[in-house]
Image (cartoon, rainbow, N blue to C red):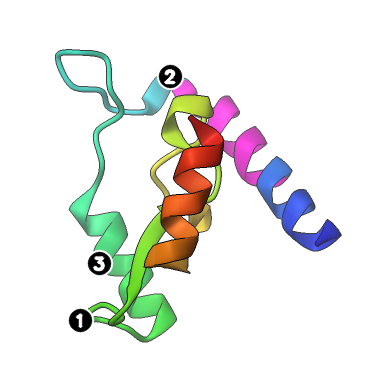
Amino acid sequence: MGYKIHISLLVAFLCYTSAASIPRDDYGRIKRSAAVVRQFKQQTGYNGGRTGYEIDHITPLHRGGCDSVENLQWLTIEEHQEKTRRER
């Protein structure tokens, strides 16, 4: 568990230090990159996705997380729904 916390802090720091270069849409929302998703799928060996799983931002975009491979993880659909509920 401690390992995940350290990774989350590192990702948050990296996202914070590069915040000026994060592309945003006309409403100020962070644009999600299809290329990042493709790269994440390739790196994890699931080019076509994983049945029963969704891709999640470890540190949510609305909490300063960035749209990068380092900030993505696979969660089951149920885990993702629960995490999303807790983060709102």
Q: Which residue is denoted by mark 2 in the rendering?
A: 20
Q: Which residue is denoted by mark 1 in the rendering?
A: 48
Foreground residue, 67 or 4?
A: 4
Residue pushed farthest bottom? 45
The location of residue 73, given as percent across then percent down, is 48, 63
Give the alpha-carbon distance from disc 1 to disc 2, as whole Å: 32 Å
Q: Which residue is denoted by mark 3 in the rendering?
A: 38
Identity of the amino acid at label 2?
Answer: Ala
Foreground residue, 77 or 43?
A: 77
Which circle's residue, 1 or 3, is located before the other in the chain? 3
Question: Which residue does the image show at 22% across and 57% down from the upper left?
Answer: 35
Left or right: 58, with 44 as reference point: right
Left or right: 51, with 80 as reference point: left
Q: Label 1: few (<14), some or many (≥20) within 10 Å? A: few
Identity of the amino acid at label 3?
Answer: Arg
Identity of the amino acid at label 1?
Answer: Gly
Which circle's residue, 2 or 3, is located before the other in the chain? 2
Q: What stretch is highlighted in magenta?
A: 10-19
Q: Is mark 1 on a helix, strand or loop?
A: loop
Q: Is residue 44 above or below residue 74?
A: below
